[in-house]
Image: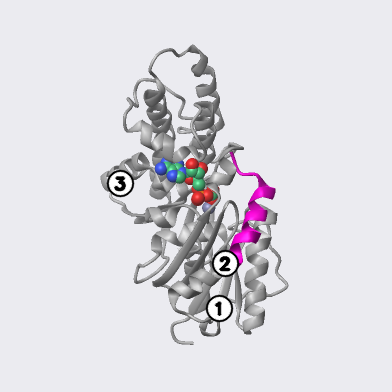
Amino acid sequence: MSVPLILALETSCDETAVAILRGPGELLVSEISSQIKEHRRFGGVVPEVASRNHLAKIEPLILRALERSGCSPAELDCVAATRGPGLLTSLLVGHSAAKGLAIALGRPFIGVNHLEGHLLSPFFGTIDGPCRSLNLIVSGGHTLLVEIDDLGSYRLLGRTVDDAAGEAFDKVAKLLGLPYPGGPEIDRLSKLGDPSRFDLPRSMSGSGNSNFSFSGLKTAVRYLLPKLEGDFLADLCASFQEAVVDVLVRKTIRAAAVSGVKLVTVSGGVSCNSRLRFKMAKATDDAGFELKLAEPWLSTDNAAMIAYAAAERLTRGYRSNFSEDADPNLSLVN
Ligand code: KG4
Ligand code: ZN
């Protein structure tokens, strides 16, 4: 197998996604079918609705990806899928479909940790691939600071003790009557607001460890809201966003300094946030770190990042056992 052709599926939450990648660097196709519209009327993701949608969409999406890439199933060298963490009934759809396809084709199967997909996404398209670095993963379900030594060699430095950063964006947006998912809406409105109008808490920013807490910030917004009158929406969004971003940036820079790394990376859906990208760029520059931000199209859930993690593992000889099951609580480090 010279440059392997990999088909990957991602169904951990509410996006059904298929990607086909040649080697670690040549993306032939990345298809994402979002279920945001189906879940919007519930104000969040409903697991049963999500799994039924994955079931309906996965086969046509695989066929479309193969057609658009010009590849035939027989040309595939490996089939990969997200193994966890995520919603079990959603994970099972992609994980089982990928295993079935791999068995039918007589090819290896790789079950990928969704968090490793996010973690490695800033290295997509780089010549050397994953290397020693300090990495912030900020998504709807997770907020983690992870030190990478090499592929598969990860150390968890800190995590949120309550809500994930994206969850805080989504919950505050809901309080403000904004549609799901709230992160992009708050980002958009914040551009029109004054981030210094409301002084909101920066929980645990001086705690000396690398953990995060965002539920107090959400509660502060909840208590402030009934006291406000007039035109406050953009200022409140900007002040909330500034509080989240300040904590994320401060803790990341401190952890990077303690770790002694040269490179900082940021990935996951919240890494699309324009204020976070701006302030992280400035802070890493001031502190003398190199910064790699995941490309926005690779930040929210997608299968290209799963294919990339599988490609890096495949070239190092890694294969998953077909008896391995999907795991909703799969952790990044053991
Ligand atoms: O990585 P992702 O697609 O899913 C998980 O693995 O959780 O992240 C989705 C999260 C949502 O909470 C969404 O509101 C947030 O990413 N998000 C943003 C932005 N774009 C997406 N949060 C803040 N600003 C954004 N521009
Ligand atoms: Zn994700």
Residue 319 x %, y %: 60, 76
Tag of residue 288: none
Q: Secondary structure at mark 1?
A: strand
Answer yes or no: is residue 221 visible: yes
Q: Residues within 10 Å of mark 3 (few under 14, many from 20)?
A: some
Q: Nearer the viewer, residue 147 or 21?
A: 21
Quarter of the figure with residue 242: top left
Residue 36 x %, y %: 53, 46
Residue labelled with disc 3: 281
Closest to the camera, between mark 3 and mark 1, is: 1
Tag of residue 60: 2
**Left or right of 4, for residue 189:** left
- Ligand 1 neighbours mark 3 (CB distance < 8 Å): no
Answer yes or no: is residue 84 visible: no
Q: Is residue 210 positioned above or below 6 on the image?
A: above
Query: Residue flagged by tag 1: what amino acid is it?
Result: Cys
Q: Which mark sits nearer the N-terminus, 3 or 1?
A: 1
Query: Residue flagged by tag 2: what amino acid is it?
Result: Pro
Residue 136 x %, y %: 45, 49
Q: Which mark sits nearer the N-terminus, 2 or 3?
A: 2
Residue at 60% across / 56% down in the picture?
Answer: 12
Q: Residues within 10 Å of mark 1 (few under 14, many from 20)?
A: many
Residue at 63% across / 55% down in the picture?
Answer: 53
Residue 156 x %, y %: 54, 52
How far apart are the alpha carbons under marks 3 and 1?
A: 37 Å
Q: Are discs 1 and 2 less than 8 Å apart at CB? A: no
Closest to the camera, between mark 2 and mark 3, is: 2
**Left or right of 331, for residue 297:** left
Tag of residue 78: 1
Query: Residue flagged by tag 3: what amino acid is it?
Result: Ala
* Magenta-highlighted residues: 44-60
